[in-house]
Each structure stands twice: as C-alpha cells, then as structure tokens.
Amino acid sequence: MQLIYEKSVPGRRGVKLPASDVPVASALPATLLRTEPAGLAEVSELDLVRHFTNLSRRNFSVDTNFYPLGSCTMKYNAKVLENAAALFAPFHPMTALLPGGAELCQGTLGMLYDLGRMLADITGMDEVTPQPLAGAHGELTGIMLVSAYHAARGNSGKKKYVVVPDSSHGTNPASAAMAGYEIVTIPTAPYGDMDLELFKAAMSDEVAAVMMTCPNTLGLFNPHIKEICDIAHSHDALMYYDGANLNAIMGKVRPGDVGFDVVHVNLHKTFGTPHGGGGPGSGPVGVKKALIPFLPQPRIVRDDNGTLLLQTDNKGTVGRMANFFGNFGVMAKAYAYIIMLGREGLIRASEQAVLNANYIKERLKPYYDLPYKMTCMHECVFSASRQLEHGVHAIDIAKFLIDRGYHPPTVYFPMIVKEAIMIEPTETESKATMDAFIETMIEAAKAAENNPQALHDAPLTMPVSRLDETKAAREQNVCCIG
Ligand SMILES: *Cc1c(COP(=O)(O)O)cnc(C)c1O
C-alpha cells in the first residue's frame, strides 16, 4: 500500500478554503511562526477517503469480529451511546468553572453528579470522583487518597508498603510505587487465589493498603475476601478494589459491602465505551466516607436547595487529577448505558458474562489444560502446556486464530500461568459466535498434534506475518506496514 505522501501531486487539493480576510495579528513571537508550508500530502478528497478507508479496513475491532481478550473487557458498545454523548457537545468544559458558570450548567453537572451516585450505588461506596482518565490513573488517585488518609492521621511515616497478589494487573504495583510505596507481592496458592497464610504473614501495621482484583485475573472470585478485608483493617490498612472489569459482579456483590474502602471502575471496559486503541478512557474512583475529605477537586456537591455547586476550597484534597471533570464524553456514555440497562439489565449483563465464560471453559476443557478448575467469573484461563509437548506455544495458537478472523485472547498473562491463554467472551456475544470460536480452538488443538508447522507458519492472511514485537513496540513505524 502506498503512503499518502507518495500519492501527493503538487497543487492537488481536497478542499478549497476561502482566502482569509482577517488580518494576521499574532501574539506568537516571530521565531515560532512557520516560514514554510507544513509539507502535507497534496491529494484529492477521493484519494484521501480511499487512503483512510483502506487503512481502517486493516483495523481489527469488535465491530468487525469476535474479540475475546481476557482481563481487558472488549465488548460491543451500543452506538446509540455515542448519540447520548453528542447531546453534551455544545457544553464547553470551562463554563462550569467560570464565576457563576455552575448555574448555567445544572444539567451537565447533574449528569456527572447522578453518574457518581449510580456508580457509588453499584460499588457500595459513599462518593465517587469522576476525574481519573483511565484505570491506572484511578489506581494512582486511589492510592494517593490512601496516602492522604494515613498522613492526616499522623501515620505517614509508619506506612511503607502496599500488598498485591502476584496475579494482579501490572498497573497495581506500578501505581502504588508511583504513589511512593514499596510493593509486597503475595504468591497465588494452588487453588487459584492469593495464598491466605502468606498474606497473613506479610501483614503488619506498616502496610498502607492491600490492592485486590476480585474476581482476580484468573477469573476467580476469592472466597476469603471478607476475611482478607478484616485482617487488613485490623492493621489499619485500607482495602483497594481494582474494578476494571465490573461486568463480573455488577448487581451481585458490592465491593463496599465486603469491606473495600476505595475502588476504581473502568467506564471504558464495563460501561459503554469501547476499550483499546489508546483511549480515551475514564477510571472514576469511589471511596468510603473516611476518604471523602481527600477527594480531588472541584467536587460537585448539592446545596440545601438542590442546586449543584463546585466545591474548590477543601484543604485536605489530593488536588486536581485531570483537566475539567475528566473525560466527559466517556462519562456521558456510561450514564446513558446505566440508564438504558437499568438495575435488571446490569444484573443480566453480569450473569451473561459469567455464563458465557463458563460455557467456553467447559467446552474447551477437554482440549486445553485448565490449571485452576473452579467455576470462573467473567473470564477463564487455559494453558497451552499440552500443545507445548508438540512444540506449539500459546503465541502460535494466537496467530492461527488471526487467520480465522478472531482477535487472539490475551496470551502470557497472568504470568503465573505457563503458556496462558485467557479468554473473555463478554456478555454481548451469542452462543453461535462462541460455538464457532470453540470449534476453531479445537481445530488449533488438533493441528498442534497433527500439523504443528501450520501453527508456526500462521498468520498467512495478514499484510505482515510475525513481527519482532519488542522492536515494533520500541521503534513504532506504522506507516511502513504493507
Ligand atoms: C485494564 C485493567 C487495568 C488498567 O486500566 P487502564 O484503563 O488500561 O489503565 C487495571 N486492572 C485490570 C484488572 C484491568 O483489566
């Protein structure tokens, strides 16, 4: 495929702008002004449309095919939600922040306020800040709140550690380290959850927080979760809940009821915004009462008359975590999604997500090793160790799936599973789609025994085959593909 610059013909134009009749009076110093044209490709409108349409067809998305990526819910999100977000487009994010602006923006602030109330209800928290821009950013915000909480009680010198299970998403220890803590990692026990005895042994009054994902990244719900919260609290440590993938438990169990003090949710996984492609995301953080004084500002509060105001004078705040109110469009979609599904709909979404994952787990169990055999929640984790006996790795199976029109499941994560293949079908897929995927996975398992070379050669249908993935990540040059 030609680069757009290779199609450039001097003088060719896609659009014709009227000549400017505004005097060029610039506040920019002359040294910053462009002296030569920008060097853009000169192409017709049709050249441009074809170029980008062809490029877009090389994109893989949920809109085109099944995308069973474990740990990072990749479900179909209804297009009507985009319309809902567009309704708010005329609102300028600065308006509410200007003097007297809050009065003009009661509807918009009301949407944010109500979304916070609904997320607080769903997670069992007392208040939610919408500011964080992603899951990891929510984690950082949450741990900063934990840190502010301990500092306010005169304990910041004493609290040194954040405890995480070794199955946790890599952002958990990274966020805690960024907030200034040392990390203590607890291994997973053979039953598939954080080893309770090792956890007890690691706990001390020097622990600031314990970060848990429940269900964890093996898709398993920890039966000891209440006990873990109680033990943490007995050491004055706070419990952090990584709620990136809440479609496992919505309407079934609330982290706040179990004993968690802080939780983030990924609106861009569970609540109406497609995940991936680098964003935008949104990772609101919910807290229990004791942490409200430290929440980021401005905080949207309701006065006695029901008017929404922006509170900006809270001395204990950890400060601003994002411009304006966070990623507003993503929040508008989450708001519309929750209203559209309603209480019963959210519960059904969770039930369907869990049922679908268990269906795939049961049907693929005869063909792939299942290291942890419990009933799973929204995702299941296999190991390609049986296929490895024939020299076939998880990555070979992933590449084979690409040729069959499937996005590969997450492979090699969680790292505690050898040759991990982590599948999350999500609540939005039909039985027919899952059955076709299962058949393809069975075909891959058979090929591993009978014709491993076919798996090593895949993918054959893509513009590029096997990439040096480290080099590709370090020296990105997407223009040259094709
Ligand atoms: C996706 C995910 C995160 C991080 O969320 P980002 O929005 O990608 O920063 C954290 N924890 C878990 C379990 C996740 O799946």
Image: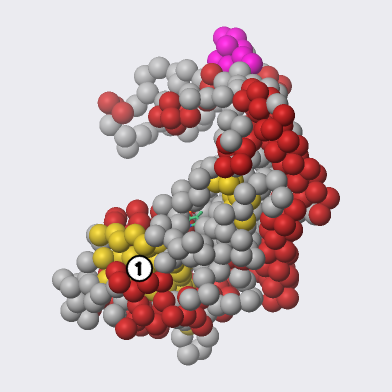
Q: Is residue 223 above or below residue 422?
A: below
Quick check: is 141 in the magenta stretch?
no
User: How is the rendered protein coloured?
Assistant: secondary structure
Residue at left offset 57%, top offset 11%: 6
Residue denoted by label 1: 198
Which is more toward the observer, 171 or 47? 171
Residue at left offset 80%, top offset 54%: 430
Residue 238 picture location, percent across and down: 35, 75
Residue at left offset 65%, top offset 23%: 453
Residue 47 picture location, percent across and down: 68, 19
Classify mark 1: helix, strand or loop: helix
Q: How many marks?
A: 1
Q: Which quadrant: the C terminus?
A: top right
Q: Amino acid at mark 1?
A: Leu
Q: Is mark 1 within 8 Å of ligand 1?
A: no
Is residue 431 toward the left or the right of residue 444 in the image?
Answer: right
Picture quarter containing residue 30?
top left
Is residue 214 something that shows in the picture?
yes
Q: Which quadrant: the N terminus?
A: top right
Picture quarter containing residue 359?
bottom right
Is residue 100 something that shows in the picture?
no
Q: Is residue 397 above or below residue 336?
A: above
Residue 242 picture location, percent across and down: 47, 64
Residues shaded magenta: 1-11
